Image (spheres, rainbow, N blue to C red):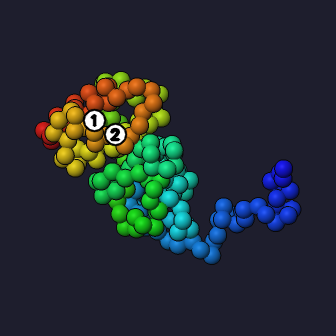
Amino acid sequence: MNTIIDQIQQGNAWPLSHAVPDPDAAQTVSLKVNGQEVHLKIEPWVSLLDALREYIGLTGTKKGCDHGQCGACTVLIDGKRINSCLTLAVMQQGCEVTTIEGLSKGDNLHPMQQAFVDHDAYQCGYCTPGQICSAVGLINEGKADTREQTSELMSGNICRCGAYTNILDAIEQAKGELSHE
């Protein structure tokens, strides 16, 4: 059995050049993140999730499965929810990106953030930023008229710690508050 060192010496290993930043391939990407203009010089294969976390330093958006299956990386693009691990930053050129950090106004939590606190809907907290962004996007979409519809439309966000009932309660509370604004 060959070890990775043996494979490298034999020239059979996967080339590591794909993992090293390539300044020659870098492109300038302009985004509006949480209300601020951001210009990044990044390679075209950098995901939006990695651009937010690694280049801008907004670590509230979580990297979960990195395959679009858990929803922990959900952010809002022009008000619509998207898994940031499944889109490239260059594809969002000129778009407005809202992360969990951009929902609150100073010390005032967004009504959805407050509802999650009120209903103890965060459990371990790892998926919470994605859950909250997805819930805000869900309300923006205006499709969830019933609790069952909300549950179905939130099914792309997976919480392994069993907070679903509390999450639905929080969304219902915030939906009521946001409809009065």
Side of 25 where 161 appears, left or right: left
Neighbor class of circle 1 (other Cα within 10 Å; few <14, some 14-19, many 20+) is: some
What amino acid is found at the position of numbered circle 1 in the picture?
Ser
Work out whether residue 156 or residue 90 is closer to the camera in this orientation and state it: 156
Q: Is residue 174 visible?
A: no
Work out whether residue 49 or residue 34 is closer to the camera in this orientation and state it: 49
Query: How many numbered badges does the structure rendering display?
Result: 2
Quadrant of res 10: bottom right
Question: Is residue 69 positioned above or below 7 on the image?
Answer: above
Spot occupied by residue 180 in the image (x, y as percentages of width and height): 13, 38
Q: In percent of the image, x 80 and y 53: which residue is there? A: 4
The residue indicated by pointer 2 is 155
- Per the image, label 1 sits on a secondary structure element best described as helix
**Extreme residue toward the front, this view:** 1
What amino acid is found at the position of numbered circle 2 in the picture?
Ser
Spot occupied by residue 137 in the image (x, y as percentages of width and height): 28, 47
Q: In percent of the image, x 24 and y 38: which residue is there? A: 150
* Residue 13: mark in rendering: none
Q: Quadrant of the C terminus?
A: top left
The residue indicated by pointer 1 is 151
Q: In percent of the image, x 37 and y 43: which residue is there? A: 156
Q: Are marks 2 and 1 in contact (CB under 8 Å)?
A: yes
Quadrant of res 19: bottom right
